[in-house]
Amino acid sequence: MKMKTILSVFAALAAAMGAFADFEFIPRKSASRYDWATTDWKSGGSYVTSLPTKSDLTWITATLIRNSTDGIFINSGTDAEVKKFYLANSNTNSRPMKLTIDGGSLTAYDVAYIGQKSPGILTLQNGGTLVAKSNTYIGLHNTSTDSSQPHVFDAKLIIADPESSFTAANTVYMGHQRGGTSLLDNKGTVSITGTGKLQLGVWTNVVEQGDIVSIITNSGTLSVASDALIGYRTNNVGRVENTGNLTIGGDCLIAREDYSEGCLCHSAGNLSIVGSVYVGYRGKGYLELAGDTETVFPGGSFALARNDWNNTIHSIGELVITNNASLSRGGKSLIAAINRNATARIALYDNAKLSDLSLLYLGNSTTDNSFEVYDNAVVSNVNLLVLNVGHTSTGAGTTRMKVSGNAKVCDLQNAYVGSNSYNHAELEIADNVWFGLRDDAWDTNRINVARDSMKSGDATIRLRGGAIGLGIRGGLVLGSTNNNVNVACTSRLVGYGCVTNQGDSSRTLWSRIDVRGGSVTADGEGVERDLDLRTFARISGHANEGRSNLNVSGTNGWYAINKGRLCYPARDPGEYNKDTGVNSRPRFVGDYARLAASTVPKYVNSMRIIPTDSSGIELTSARCLFVELYAPDRTDIPAGLVEDGEESLRLGVWRGCIAQNYANASRRDFTTAETTIRYDQWRLFGLKDGNGNYPEGLQIRLYQYDGTSWKRVTGYSAAEAESNGYRISGTLYPVSGVYNLGWFAVVAKCNKTGTAIVIR
C-alpha cells in the first residue's frame, strides 16, 4: 500500500476515535430528570449503550437536554469517570445547565469545567463526591481572543451537606469568565491538595464586559494546600465568607493585582493561614475577623496595603476585628501602608483584641492612614508601635490613631508617633481609655513623639479624658533638643486627662518627661478640665545635650488654653541624677532639675523657685514643688487680676505649693521664694500693632494674690522684654492654706501717664 493511502487510513481512524471519545448527552426519552446511570443516551447522533470512561471528553449542555428542568443526576451507586468534563459548553445557553451528584461520584482525570461559556450549576448532595485530578474552573470563557460573545454568566459549585465533598488535586480557578458571578458554596468538605492553589477572579480583560465577582461561602471544611488568591486579576472581585473551618497552607493574598478587590470575612469556626497574609497586595483588600473567634497568624509576613515603592497604582488594605474576635501574631509583625501609594485602615471595636506583635507599623506613604480602637477593644503586648515614621520625601500623608470608648492599648515596650518633618501623625486618647507602656518599663522604654535629630517633626498626642501610663521608669519624649533654630515646635501633648505611673508607687520618681523640642498644652476645650502630670516625676534630659540646645525655637514648653489647667510634673526631692550620682534638690518647674541655682529657666512657662529661711539661706531639706498653670479664661482665678483686652493680657497665671511630699503637705519653714519665670512671649506678641510696636506704656508685671487682692511684686517695660529673655524675677511670700505659694501671675498692662488738670 502506498504511503499516502496508509496515512489517509490512519487519519480517518483517528477522526473516528476522536468522535467516539467526545460525548454530548441527549436523552432519548422525555422526562423531568435524567439519571447518568441510564444507557438511554446518544452521542454524535447515535445512541450509545455505555457511559463515558476516564478516556472520554464529556460535554453536558442545556441546549441538548431540551426537556429537562432539573438537569442530570448521578445517583448513589453510580461512580462516573471521565477525562475532561464540560458543564454548559455553549455560548448560546441562557438557562443554567444543572448536574446533581446525588449520592454518587464523578471523577475527572483531566480538567473539569463548571459553567464554560454559559451558566452551569453543579450540586453535591446526600454524600455526593466530585474528584478533579487536574485544574478545576468555576466559570470559564471560551478563548481569550474570542470577543464575539460576552461570556457574562453565573457558575456555581454547591456542596449542600456535611456528607458531600469535593477534592481537587490541582488549582481551582474561579471567575475566569468575562462577567457575572462564580460561586463555591460549601457545607461539606473541600480539599485542594498537592501544590494546588485557590484563585478567585482570574480573567484580566473585563473592562468593557463588567466586573467578575467570585464568592466562596464556607460553613464546612475548606483546606487549600498552597496559596489562596482572593481577588486576583484587574477589575475582579473575590470574596470569602467563612463560618466553618478554613485552612490555607501557603500565602493568602487578598486583592493581588492592580485595581482588583478582595475580601475575607471570618465570623465563626476556625481560620488558619500557615504562610504570609497580604491584605491589599496591589489592589483593594479587606480582612474582617468577627464573632467569638480566636485567630493566630504565626507565619511569615502580615501586611496591609503592601505595594511596590514605585508602583503608581494605589493599594488599599483594611483590617477590621470586631464582636469579641481576637487576632494574635505570636510575636511577629504587622506592617501597614509602608510604601508610597498605599492606604491602610485598622479598626478594632466591640470587645475585639489584637495582641502579641513584635512590631505594629502603620503609615509611611503619601496618603492618610487610620487606626481606630474603641468600644472595649484591646491592643496588647506590642514590642514597638510605630505611627507614620520614616518617609523621607515631600507629600507624606497623616496617620491618625484614635483610642476611645473604654478601649485599651497596653503593655507596649516602645512607641513612635511621627518622625521627621515629612511625616504627620496624630494619636487621640479619649475618655476612659488607657494607653500605656508595660508596668516594668525601664529607661529605654518610651513613647516618642516626633523624635528625630535635626528635624522638627510633626506629631500630636491629644488627650480627651484618657490616661497615659509610663510604667516604673518609662518616658514620654517630645521632639529633640537638636531641632533647628527658629523652627516652630511640632511635637505636642495637648488636651485633658492624665499621664501617670502604673508601676510601683514607691518608684514614681523614675518616670520622666522630656520636653526637648516639644510642647505640652492643657486644653479644656471650653470646659474647666485638667491635664494632670503630677505623678510624672521629673523633667529629664541627657547631660551631653547641653543647655544651649534647649528651646532654640522659643516655642517649646508649657501652655494652658480654653479653660484648661496644667498640673506640672512634680519635682521630687529624691530624684536621682545618674550623671552625677547624687540627689538634687528641686528648684525648677517645667525645666531640667539638675541645674545650678544661677541657671535661668528656658522653656516657655517654666520657672525657678528657691525657698529661703529668715536668714536668706536656701532650704536644703527634702521638699517637692507642685505648681499649676491656668488658662487665662478660667473662672476660678481670683477676681481683680488684669483682664485680657486690647492693651492688656494675662501672660500666665499659676498657683503653687512647696510641699513635704506627694500628698501636698505644705511646708511652713520658708519665708521667701525667689522666683524667676519664663513667660509666654507669643501671647505678648499679640499686643503688637501692624507695625510691630507695643502700645504706649505697656509693662510686664509680676503679681501675687495675698488672699484678698492682687499685689504687684515687680515689673519692667515691654521694650525690655526681649533683652530680659522674656523672664521676670521677684520674691513671693507664703500665704495661708495648702497652696502656700498661693496665686501668682505675669501680665502685660499699660501704664499710661498724662497731664492732670485740676479745676479749683
Image (cartoon, rainbow, N blue to C red):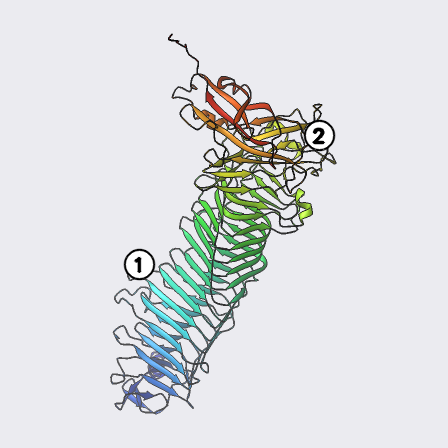
How far apart are the alpha carbons under marks 2 and 1? 82 Å
**Is residue 351 among the parts visible in the rendering?**
yes
Mark 1 surroundings: few (<14), some (14-19) or many (≥20) residues within 10 A: few
At 53% from the left edge and 66% from the top edge, which residue is drawn? 294
- 464 and 625: which is toward the camera: 625
In-front residue for pair 589/416: 589
Residue 232 visible to the viewer: no
Return the mark for residue 88: none
| Numbered circle sitting on residue 619 | 2
Percent x, y of residue 732: 60, 26
What's the amino acid at mark 1?
Answer: Val
- The residue sitting at the top extreme is 760
In the image, farthest residue toward the front: 760
The quarter of the rendered structure image containing the N terminus is: bottom left
Q: What residue type is disc 2 on?
A: Leu
Q: Quadrant of residue 209?
A: bottom left
Badge 1 marks a residue whose secondary structure is loop
**Percent of width and height locating residue 380:** 57, 56
Helix, strand or loop at disc 2? Answer: loop
Q: Residue at x 37, y 56 (%)?
A: 259
With 59 as the anchor, is 432 left or right in this view? Answer: right
Q: Which residue is mark 1?
A: 207
Question: Does residue 312 lie above or below 514 as drawn?
Answer: below
- Residue 253: x, y in percent? 47, 61
| Residue at 69 percent of width and 23 percent of height | 616
Q: Is residue 577 above or below residue 328?
A: above
The relative height of residue 517 versus residue 36 in the rendered view (above or below) is above
**Image quadrant where one finds the C terminus:** top left
